[in-house]
Amino acid sequence: MSLKQKTLDLKKRMQEALQGGGTKAIEKQVASGKMTARERIIALLDPNSFHEYDLFVEHSAKDFDMDKKHLPGDGVITGTGALNGYPVCIYAQDFTVAGGSLGLMHARKITKIMDHAMKLKVPIIGINDSGGARIQEGVNSLAGYGEIFFRNSSASGVIPQISVILGPCAGGAVYSPALTDFVFVVDKISKMFITGPEVIKTVLGEEISMEDLGGARVQSELTGNAHFFALSEQECFDQIKKLASFIPWNNTKKAEAFPKKSPKNKIYNIDEDFPTDPKQPYDVRNIIKAVCDDSDFFEIHENFAANIVVGFARMNGQTAGFVANQPLVMAGVLDVDSSDKAARFIRYCDAFSIPLITFVDLPGYLPGVDQEHAGVIRHGAKILYSYSEATVPKITVILRKAYGGGYIAMCSRHLRADFVFAWPTAEIAVMGPEGAANIIFRSEILAAENPEEMRKLKVKEYKKKFANPYVAAAFGYVDAVIDPNETRKFLTHAIEISSNKVENRPTRKHGIPPF
Ligand code: HXC
């Protein structure tokens, strides 16, 4: 055969392989509102940047007549490409080929591209759309998952790992996304669960739909397994591109610097709009937008544990991670879920050299039987641990309430914040004035001729003495009480002068965080 003929033969083989599961299966995929695996990769990556590998990989199974079946690419597409101009490794499971089920060679393709990502020190993006372990391949499928989980764990904190759930992700398969940094879901398309509705009905007699069990809304609002929710696949890809613009490509790099931009005018007038009454709610995201570049705040986990807000923004062109209590939801208390959410984000920022800015306004940890029994002690400890462990620049601004354990937990000086600023509206105390006065002045209140009047008097006395930032400032726990309108100035300066910060922790194999 001449070179030309051989090349034609190659093209023919490629054409066959590119058909995936064939016209019928592709039609079914499209009819269910989903893109095909290749379309997804093309839509996500920079134009013409995708290079596919292992197109001709074949499965090796023999049992259950598998030796008679041809599964193009063994149900997964792998390769390299570019996202926002930077290199990435990527894989996308092809549901049109045996339901994207994972057998030995399918898993080997994934682990090979993961190994590439680790060697090249670039992000790995996994698009999941699969019926899970390929039943006909038995233990080899389980082995494949195990190899993926091991690599997910090894890559954690070294390269960014992004999971996109665009179909079913069932059984133990869910644990690869769960081990990665960011999980994206799409309404009515994504489904994640360990055991599906049928098993639940058989074992527990409960009936539930796939959507209600593990659909996109459930995973992004209730469980927190997903960090981003989108209404369409294209919106999801746009979210991924935006996320990628904020994060460094690996743990030895800094995130790309963008041109400096001032916050948008009139987004929030602190003087007029900020409520000094400690009981009045407000949306803390407006404060973040009032200080960050272009008022562009990219929120993570927006629909989960909304009593704390986390996300990325830029300060003078540099990425910063924001953690802020949200007085709009449950007064911004710390509870089981918000502690989990914040702790994970803090650890991400620390692993990838992203400075942390914390805005504090909370009454403390949420009291109650439900929280105690749900493990608020163990989960609440995660935020203490992650702030203490973090050695990136840490800057804290106390906006209003900083009571009790909440004061300590929200990146206080004692957990080694580098800079602690407070607005004149800050109230730093062991607890709120009402509760405190009731306890420490109990006998005087009870003995008074008019106990209610006495109580009010004592609350006022306590407020005057403690409900301000100046006692903490007098001990040096607060570095500066600042004009709220100068917050951006103080933050950008603190970040700039911290750019070469070095802080060491004791030598050890690793700590044992309370997870
Ligand atoms: C082999 C599978 C498969 C699987 C689907 N297929 N899942 N083949 N192993 N796990 C095949 C189907 O036989 C079918 O092949 C094709 O994929 C499309 O599947 P359909 O059922 O027709 O599609 P749909 O109606 O959309 O339903 C999708 C589904 C369903 C909900 C995912 O297929 C399903 O319930 N699959 C089984 C899910 C599961 O229980 N997986 C094992 C989980 S345990 P044909 O040839 O007919 O087109 C697990 C353990 C991992 O993953 C542990 C790791 C630690």
Image (cartoon, rainbow, N blue to C red):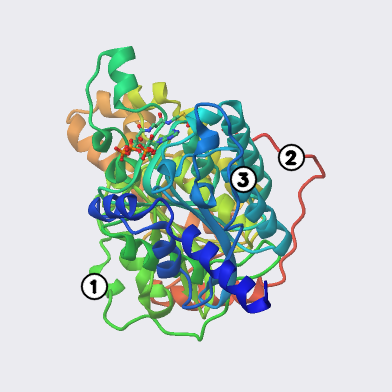
Q: Which residue is mark 2?
A: 510
Q: CA distance from mark 3 to mark 2?
A: 18 Å
In the figure, is residue 514 to the left or right of 158?
left
| Residue 55 appears anywhere in the view | yes
Residue sitting at x 33%, y 82%? 264
* Mark 2 residue crowding within 10 angstroms, few (<14) / some (14–19) / many (20+): few
Q: Mark 2 near ligand 1 (CB under 8 Å)?
A: no
Q: Mark 1 near ligand 1 (CB under 8 Å)?
A: no
The image quadrant where one finds ligand 1 is top left
Mark whose residue sits in front, 3 or 2:
3
Residue sitting at x 32%, y 60%? 233
Q: Residue 375 or 95: which is nearer the viewer?
A: 95
Q: Earlier in the sequence, mark 1 or mark 2?
A: 1
Mark whose residue sits in front, 1 or 3:
3
Label 2 sits on what residue type? His
Labels 3 & 2 near each other (Cβ < 8 A): no
Q: CA distance from mark 1 to mark 2?
A: 48 Å
Mark whose residue sits in front, 1 or 2:
2
Q: Position of residue 507 (x, y in %)?
A: 82, 44
Helix or strand or loop: what does disc 2 sit on? loop
Q: Earlier in the sequence, mark 3 or mark 2?
A: 3
Helix or strand or loop: what does disc 1 sit on? helix
Q: CA distance from mark 1 to mark 3?
A: 48 Å
- Quarter of the picture containing the N terminus is bottom right
User: As displayed, is residue 272 above or below residue 137?
Assistant: below
In the figure, is residue 354 to the left or right of 454?
right
Q: Which residue is mark 3?
A: 152
User: As displayed, is residue 37 above or below residue 51?
Assistant: above
Q: Position of residue 45 (x, y in %)?
A: 47, 70
Labels 1 & 3 near each other (Cβ < 8 A): no
Q: Position of residue 28 (x, y in %)?
A: 27, 50
